[in-house]
Image: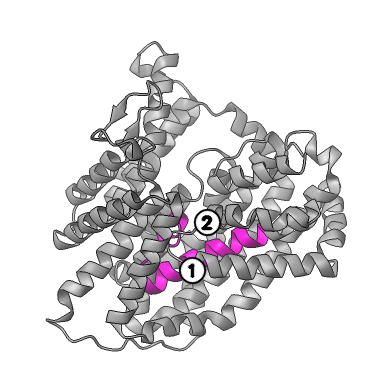
Amino acid sequence: MDAFNSLLDGFGTALTPINLLWAAIGVLLGTAIGVLPGIGPAMAVALLLPVTYGLDPIGAFIMFAGIYYGAMFGGSTTSILLNTPGESAAVVAAMEGNPMAKSGRGAQALAAAAIGHFAGGMVGTLLLVALAPTVAKLAVDIGAPDYFAIMVLAFIAVTSVLGSSRIRGLASLLIGLTLGLVGLDQMTGQQRLTFGSLQLADGIDVVIVAVGLFAIGEALWVAAHLRRRPPEPIPVGRPWLGRGDVRRTWKSWLRGPFIGFPFGAIPAGGAEIPTFLSYVTEKRLSKHKDEWGKGAIEGVAGPESAASASAAGTLVSMLTLGLPTTAVAAVMLAAFQQYGIQPGPLLFEREPDLVWGLIASLFVGMVLLLALNLPLAPVWAKLLRIPRPYLYAGIMFFAAVGAYAVGGEVIDLVILLIIGLIGFGMRRYGLPVLPAVIGVILGPNAEQQLRRALQISDGSVTGLVNTPFAVTVYAVIVALLA
């Protein structure tokens, strides 16, 4: 009960007019920036960090929370409408959301995503209030074998349910794992696949890979087929969900948070793994299996709910342990330190107004996000009425801007084009794009955790299965393959 009493005090802080204003500005800025391909929540928070220097800490962090959730929704907007994820957590939204948009149901996909974000954020934040100390304690006890098992589960799950065959899914995953090897070995410092280029020593940024494979690959594919088949205008459709849509999605909205929140709270890849696992779960449970790959609305609702709950989960380990589990949490940790505040077990005692004001502002931000974006769904969907040559030219322009903004290096644009050509080739030969993006995101982390686990066990393979958690995860993998 103490936590909920503290939360009520937090609402007293979050609902002051000035803090409501910062929350609304954060949601609007986050959504607007999230719509730009390549500029995800982490970059949005980092870009706007200097803007908050003059604000008091509570106002600044309430604004950051709004930016975080707004940018996540903005990323899924372009993912659904243009097949161009604004950030890695929005990759899965393209799988069913983009086919829905192409069939004239873009507004429904956006509405399902908006309500999914609201439901996931609300449930996730309630879990944050109730379970923060317990989840933080569990996160401390999870070791390298457990992390590696979780990542293997993500690899198997995504390659076994996507594409026309598992072989193609595995080939796509291998492409992603190879791209993830580029750069310096994290353990030894040796260069791998850099071809002597210093610019490649830091590796290829996930944003560049995701934007290249999805946006550039899609734009080149469309350009290659435009002359053969004259483009037809895509209908926008009605802006609200029908009863049938709600019947199909309400369980997905409620399942998503219980997949997303635990993964957000432990350092296992942020919102990427739970969105993929939610997608797999919804596909397994769906009664409309023939619609998957052609625009199944559950494939938008579940992953978006999981992504939003995962965002709440990341705050658990950051606030209670000072452990950032995602890029956004790392930027917010830097912001805390900028104000001379050190997150950790004592933060709830030393800065209760700040912590509970921030947590209460998450509820406020969710309501603002839903109130702003449900009416805007048909407006965003009208992007599809732009003639396709202009639309894809615009996508390539913003993709290039987003890729250049990542590092400010011209070589990033060259890499973007090369990866775009790889994406074009994958479409040509029927390889699903998603496993490749998974390989790039999780490959380096999986390698690091595998090597740590083997070092701890002196090279013995049994070191990978010496915890009950890891054994349980491998049992789930066997069941999934069976």
Q: Element at badge 2? A: helix
Measured Cα–Cα span from mark 2 to mark 1: 19 Å
Rendered position, 122 above or below 166: below
Q: Main secondary structure of the magenta part?
A: helix
Could you tell me the amino acid type at mark 1? Answer: Val
Give x and y (percent) for residue 31: 56, 68
Name the residue located 64 percent from the left edge and 39 percent from the top edge.
317
Mark number displayed over residue 35 = 1
Quadrant in the rendering for residue 222: bottom left
Task: Name the mark nearer the viewer: 2 or 1.
Answer: 1
Give x and y (percent) for residue 33: 53, 66
- Please give the range of residues in magenta: 64-92
Q: Earlier in the sequence, mark 2 or mark 1?
A: 1
Name the residue located 44 percent from the left edge and 26 percent from the top edge.
145
On the image, numbered disc 2 is attached to which residue?
A: 306
Mark 1 surroundings: few (<14), some (14-19) or many (≥20) residues within 10 A: many
Residue 32 can be seen in this image: yes
Quadrant showing the C terminus: top left
Mark number displayed over residue 183 = none
Name the residue located 64 percent from the left edge and 58 percent from the top edge.
123
Give x and y (percent) for residue 232: 25, 88
Question: Farthest top residue?
Answer: 458
Give x and y (percent) for residue 437: 34, 50
Quadrant in the rendering for residue 215: bottom left
* 273 to the left or right of 104: right
